[in-house]
């Protein structure tokens, strides 16, 4: 039996290592949460809340949001105020019927974060420099 070796793309190897380091450094689950923390200056709990709202594409009940984001209900109001400040006016409307949602402005702010500090954005910039 022989061991077949495949060429390693240096850029992809570097990006994988970078993404792993960022997730460990920020103590988050996903690259998206790390992007939000870096771009907006959020803490891990705040980034998880935004990630839950972003993934939902609609209203999320408070109970479901705190459970999915693994944050305490008592921290929620403080976290939401910081998220509103970071994402900008109109990104996260006040609570309606015990549920929250990101507006198009909020989603666009998250997309901007990913484009500017995300691993995919870095990949595009590195490949543009290389080629």
Image (spheres, helix red, strand yellow):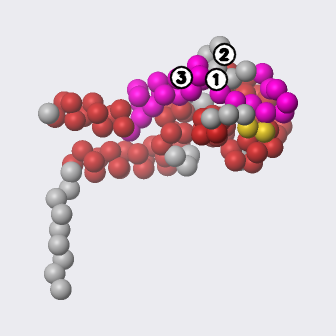
**Residue that numbered label 1 is attached to:** 103
Give the extent of the magenta segment: 94-119
Residue 115 in the magenta stretch? The answer is yes
Residue 99 placement, left or right of 7: right
**Viewer-proximal residue among 70 and 59:** 59
**SS under mark 2:** loop
Give the mark nearest the N terminus, 1 or 2: 2
Residue 43 x %, y %: 62, 35
Residue 115 x %, y %: 41, 28
Q: Quarter of the image holding residue 116?
A: top left
The reply to whether callout 3 and callout 1 are in contact (CB within 8 Å) is no
**Residue that numbered label 2 is attached to:** 90
**SS under mark 3:** helix
Q: Residue at x 56, y 26 (%)?
A: 107
Give the mark nearest the N terminus, 2 or 3: 2
Residue 14 x %, y %: 29, 47
Q: Residue at x 35, y 32 (%)?
A: 121
Residue that sits furthest to the top in the current view:
89
**Residue that numbered label 3 is attached to:** 109
Is 104 above or below relative to 20?
above
């Amino acid at each position: 039996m022989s061991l077949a070796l495949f060429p390693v793309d240096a850029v992809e190897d570097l990006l994988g290592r970078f993404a792993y380091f960022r997730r460990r450094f920020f103590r988050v689950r996903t690259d998206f949460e790390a992007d939000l923390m870096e771009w907006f200056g959020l803490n891990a709990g705040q980034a998880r809340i935004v990630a839950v709202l972003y993934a939902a594409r609609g209203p999320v009940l408070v109970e479901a949001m705190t459970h999915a984001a693994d944050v305490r209900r008592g921290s929620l109001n403080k976290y939401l105020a910081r998220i509103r400040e970071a994402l900008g006016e109109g990104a996260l409307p006040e609570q309606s019927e015990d549920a929250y949602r990101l507006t198009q402005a909020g989603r666009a702010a998250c997309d901007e974060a990913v484009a500017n500090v995300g691993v995919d954005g870095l990949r595009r910039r590195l490949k543009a420099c290389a080629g």
